[in-house]
Image (cartoon, coloured by chain):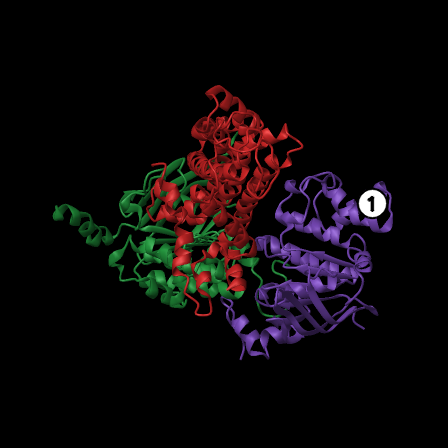
């Protein structure tokens, strides 16, 4: 079976639910458009913050007041009328650099999480469904990765590959897939023995089809939730690598690198404070969305959530 | 090409009906490995036959091997010995491949209604899977739901909004939709309320017989089996100790174990007699 | 005079804005030396009635009415006081014996636990009492049995041990919630006989919750039939089974396989 197959129905239950959701005439327009899975107060706040960040990242070239690399201003000037968030040690505008950095950090984090979720859950599903030797090999490799603290292993890999955004992404991918593999494996193992899966096999489903049709819908939402929560930690790990000069190469703007720079300039609090605030808000936003998905993707609680908010 | 396609169908249509049983178990055995080494024979030399349009009740106490026997019939367990033959085809154990086409005529209803439906798929989708096997069976999702006394709008719902008895009826509908020739019920009523048990058992029997199938109904409860079975097989410690028409088992049991089982059933007569007291 | 007298017992659970009435004006008595059987389908409130007597109603439940236990009012009794009664004067046996015991502790430790807690008996004396009581509930080889772990017993034997644990503090009331439902028929008869004996010998007031009219017909003295939290019929065993007054009782008995009801 191909890598994509078990992910195929991934979004199906969500989008389907949203599409078939009868439009309640009492609802306002914006509520109809809002995905049902996020209709909790936390989900709305999280999605709101995320949308703001997306707008900021997409329109950064228009919104950013200055050139991110130009060293045109007095060094270390505190926030003022011209440089709203102050300037850094080289006289670059902090606001501009934050906005430009969002353009690389956000897509990179989402990309790395999607890749590791795909890789991890496919490996985990294979291990869980087929068991025996395949299971042993995949899960022992996963254990090996788990044996090291994430950031240390990511550092080692990034250092070995050399600094740079691409290598940082590879490093994070390599350290983060095992948690998906482990979750997916145990979910698949439980589901494999369930009577509904056996009933499907008795109806003539092949192993692959039962994995994709019967098991995947039961596995997908925990993985989606885990992935959403993981975007936050991917951003943090990436910032950590940049902080240790293993991520984006200067002078490319990056939140982690900016904090790293700010640490040595303690009096100029704004250099580290504002990128830190960015990381905080974006990690929070993803965590809110993840929590909200966790509550709504379960058919048991989903109905209650639907009833109370609509 | 058409002649090749039609040949097996034509063969099953008249020739074996002459006398060969629909399902035949010939000294079947099944073993499990025990944790401490050694083997446990859950099923030990069972020979049974199931005719067409017949309901066979299989009774025995927990641990007697009746569920293992059901799995053997469906190909979910590999026999250590003996053969299972369905409609002239040997039943092979189910591996990673698709189940052989000629074996799809054996379908099963499981014990636990809470695990036998996929919680993340709509009822309609699950019934459609089964209907795809048997497009000429004349069933639709609506007619299936109607046959098991559920409203048509159930199709749009997920399993969690149904009670145990309703789920079990959906599971019966799904098994039925596949157009089975043998319907195996592995304790399908054991986890239901006593007052529902007889109703669901009778429903299963009627639907199976009306659609031209045979049924093996496994239960620990002799009194329900008495209600629906044509013949009863009594199982003890992996062996079949007695097989006879239901009336005969009930009124004139031969084997001591059958007698013991019958004597243990409390009578609903209000006399305050604990079974087996005297 | 009744050991326990339940009058107009109401139980409702509020979740969010929705209030569910689980019991509505339930009234009946439990008398010493008699088995009162409560029958009903799942969701009829029969188990909740038993739990209310034990003071084990679910969190957020609103209980009103009266449960009089030898002149002591149990409804509204502070939890601490109820704890002192539970396991000593009020005891309970559950449906699934396999999950009623802790898998990692010996049977002896588990059945003497509340005896030692409530009556400050020494470990040695408690164990001696456990052996005696296991003998009484006909657990084979009681001396060895106290040292064994739950998984070493069959379901029927575990249920006997559960009964031993329930009566070790000489209770006045025993609530048995579907005690034979998880057991095979041949084992069931033995447990029913044990229940009858304990009730007669120890003068226990027994509340037997079950959905099985066969069980009620064998051991119950009085039968209470419940439907949706309401008592629909109360009466002597033979009268209720052979000549049910309420339509619902009749339908339940008629739904049983092979049951004949005299009109």
A214 on left or right of B194: left
On screen, C257 above or below C114? below
Q: Colour of chain C?
A: purple
Where residue C54 appears, as percent x and y from the top left, is 74, 61
Residue at the image point whose x is 28% and y is 48% from the top: B87
Residue at the image point whose x is 58% and y is 65% from the top: C43
Q: Please, which residue is most extreme toward the top here?
A: A160
Where residue B93 appears, as percent x and y from the top left, is 36, 39
Residue pointed to by mark 1: C126
C254 or A225: nearer the viewer: A225
Residue at the image point whose x is 57% and y is 38% from the top: A275
Quadrant assignment for the N terminus of chain B: top left
Q: Colour of chain A?
A: red
Q: Colour of chain B?
A: green
Q: Is residue B130 among the parts visible in the rendering?
A: yes
In the rendered structure, the residue with mark 1 lies on which chain? C
B154 or C102: nearer the viewer: B154
A193 or C132: nearer the viewer: A193
Residue C126 quadrant: top right
On screen, C9 above or below A259? below
């Amino acid at each position: 079976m191909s890598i994509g197959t078990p992910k195929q129905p991934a979004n199906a239950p969500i989008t389907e639910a949203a599409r078939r959701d009868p439009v309640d005439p009492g609802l306002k327009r914006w509520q109809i458009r809002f995905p049902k899975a996020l209709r909790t107060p936390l989900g709305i706040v999280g999605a709101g913050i995320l949308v703001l960040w997306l707008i900021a990242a997409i329109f950064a070239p228009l919104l950013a007041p200055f050139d991110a690399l130009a060293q045109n201003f007095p060094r270390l000037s505190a926030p003022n009328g011209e440089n709203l968030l102050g300037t850094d040690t080289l006289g670059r505008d902090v606001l501009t650099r934050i906005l430009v950095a969002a353009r690389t950090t956000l897509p990179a984090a989402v990309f790395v999480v999607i890749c590791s979720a795909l890789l991890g859950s496919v490996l985990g599903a294979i291990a869980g469904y087929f068991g025996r030797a395949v299971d042993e090999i995949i899960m022992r490799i996963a254990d090996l990765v788990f044996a090291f603290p994430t950031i240390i292993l990511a550092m080692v890999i990034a250092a070995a590959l050399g600094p740079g955004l691409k290598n940082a992404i590879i490093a994070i991918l390599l350290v983060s897939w095992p948690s998906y593999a482990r979750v997916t494996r145990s979910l698949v193992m439980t589901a494999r023995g369930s009577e509904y899966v056996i009933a499907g096999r008795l109806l003539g489903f092949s192993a692959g089809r039962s994995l994709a049709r019967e098991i995947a819908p039961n596995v997908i939402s925990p993985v989606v939730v885990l992935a959403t929560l993981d975007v936050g930690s991917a951003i943090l790990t990436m910032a950590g690598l940049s902080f240790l000069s293993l991520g984006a190469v200067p002078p490319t703007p990056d939140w982690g690198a900016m904090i790293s720079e700010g640490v040595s300039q303690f009096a100029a609090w704004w250099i580290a404070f504002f990128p830190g605030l960015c990381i905080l808000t974006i990690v929070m936003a993803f965590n809110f969305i993840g929590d909200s998905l966790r509550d709504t993707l379960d058919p048991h609680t989903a109905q209650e959530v639907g009833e109370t908010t609509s | 090409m058409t002649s090749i396609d039609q040949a097996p169908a034509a063969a099953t249509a008249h020739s074996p009906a002459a006398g060969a049983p629909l399902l035949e178990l010939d000294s079947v055995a099944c073993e499990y490995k025990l944790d401490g080494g050694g083997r446990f024979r859950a099923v030990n030399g069972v020979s049974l036959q199931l005719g067409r349009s017949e309901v066979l009740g299989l009774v025995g106490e927990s641990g007697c091997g009746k569920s293992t026997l059901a799995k053997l019939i469906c190909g979910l367990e590999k026999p250590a010995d003996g053969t299972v033959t369905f409609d002239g085809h040997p039943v092979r154990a189910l591996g990673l491949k698709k189940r052989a086409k000629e074996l799809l005529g054996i379908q099963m209803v499981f014990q636990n209604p809470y695990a036998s439906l996929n919680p993340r798929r709509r009822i309609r989708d699950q019934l459609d899977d089964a209907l795809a096997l048997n497009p000429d069976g004349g069933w639709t999702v609506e007619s299936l739901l109607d046959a098991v006394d559920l409203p048509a709008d159930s199709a749009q719902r997920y399993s969690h909004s149904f009670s145990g008895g309703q789920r079990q009826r959906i599971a019966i509908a799904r098994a039925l939709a596949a157009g089975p020739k043998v319907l195996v019920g592995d304790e399908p009523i054991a986890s239901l309320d006593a007052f529902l048990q007889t109703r669901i058992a009778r429903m299963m029997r009627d639907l199976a017989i009306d659609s031209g199938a045979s049924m093996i109904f496994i239960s620990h409860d002799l009194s329900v089996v008495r209600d629906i079975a044509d013949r009863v097989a009594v199982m003890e410690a992996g062996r079949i100790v007695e097989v006879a028409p239901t009336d005969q088992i009930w009124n004139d049991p031969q084997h001591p174990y059958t007698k013991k089982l019958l004597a243990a059933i409390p009578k609903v007569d209000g006399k305050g007699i604990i079974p087996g007291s005297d | 005079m009744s050991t326990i007298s339940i009058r107009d017992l109401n139980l409702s659970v509020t979740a969010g804005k929705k209030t569910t009435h689980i019991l509505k004006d339930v009234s009946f008595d439990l008398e010493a030396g008699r088995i009162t059987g409560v029958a009903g389908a799942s969701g009829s409130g029969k188990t909740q009635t038993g739990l209310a007597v034990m003071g084990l109603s679910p969190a957020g439940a609103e209980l009103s009415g009266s449960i009089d236990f030898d002149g002591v009012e149990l409804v509204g009794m502070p939890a601490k006081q109820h704890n002192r009664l539970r396991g000593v004067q009020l005891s309970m046996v559950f449906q699934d014996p396999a999950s009623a015991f802790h898998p990692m502790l010996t049977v002896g430790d588990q059945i003497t636990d509340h005896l030692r807690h409530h009556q400050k008996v020494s470990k040695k004396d408690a164990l001696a009492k456990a052996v005696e009581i296991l003998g009484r509930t006909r657990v084979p080889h009681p001396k060895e049995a106290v040292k064994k772990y739950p998984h070493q017993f069959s379901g029927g034997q575990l249920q006997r041990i559960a009964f031993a644990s329930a009566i070790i503090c000489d209770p006045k009331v025993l609530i048995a919630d579907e005690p034979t439902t998880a057991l095979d028929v041949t084992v069931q008869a033995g447990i029913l006989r044990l229940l009858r004996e304990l009730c007669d010998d120890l003068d226990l007031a027994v509340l037997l919750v079950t959905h099985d009219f066969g069980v009620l017909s064998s051991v119950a003295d009085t039968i209470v039939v419940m439907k949706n939290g309401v008592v629909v019929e109360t009466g002597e065993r033979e009268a209720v089974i052979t000549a049910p007054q309420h339509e619902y009782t009749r339908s339940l008995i008629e739904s049983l396989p092979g049951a004949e009801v005299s009109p």
